[in-house]
Image: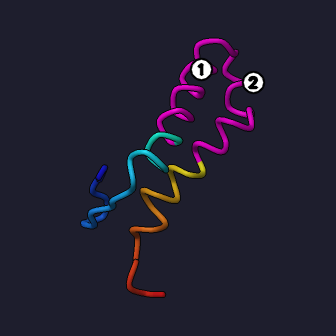
Amino acid sequence: MAQFKSNGWEVYFHPQLFGRQYQELFERVSRLQEQLPEGAYKTHATVKLFAAITVAIETKITSDIMSG
């Protein structure tokens, strides 16, 4: 099972479900970065989606998991 650490927490996710989708999204964003000018890249919906998911995983979920 795939994992990473953030804010002292180990976060696990199923590699063939979320992990594969996240990797595919990362690859799409990487291609967009190569193809688009900076302004268009920063405002592209796929890039914004990837950024929001990444912030949620790395910051929001792990910031204070016990406060909820």
Q: Give the CA separation, mark 2 to mark 1.
A: 9 Å
- Where is residue 53 drawn, in percent x and y? 56, 52
Q: Amino acid at mark 2?
A: Ala
Q: What element does badge 1 sit on? A: helix
Residue 66 on image: x %, y %: 38, 85
Considering only vertical position in the picture, is 31 above or below 51? Answer: above
Residue at 40% x, 70% y is: 63
Please rate how many residues cluster around mark 2, counting C-alpha atoms within 10 Å: few if below 14, some from 14 to 19, many from 20: few
Residue 46 located within the stretch drawn in magenta: yes
Q: Which residue is mark 1?
A: 33
- Describe residue 22's horizontal placement relative to residue 2 as left or right: right
Q: How is the image coloured?
A: rainbow
Viewer-closest of 28 and 64: 28
Circle 2 sits on which residue?
A: 40
The magenta segment is 22-51
Q: Quadrant of residue 32?
A: top right
Left or right: residue 16 compared with residue 40: left
Q: Please, is residue 52 above or below residue 65 in the view?
A: above
Question: Residue at 54% of width from left, 23% of height from top?
Answer: 30
Q: Residue at x 24, y 66 (%)?
A: 8
Extreme residue in the top direction = 35
Furthest residue toward front:
16
Which disc number belongs to residue 50? none
Q: Residues within 10 Å of mark 1 (few under 14, many from 20)?
A: some
Q: What amino acid type is highlighted by mark number 1?
A: Gln
User: From the viewer's perspective, is residue 39 above or below residue 6?
Assistant: above
**Figure disc tally:** 2
Q: Main secondary structure of the magenta part?
A: helix
Quick one: 37 or 27, which is closer to the camera? Answer: 27
Residue 60 in the magenta stretch? The answer is no
Return the disc, 2 or 1, that comes first in the chain's sequence.
Answer: 1
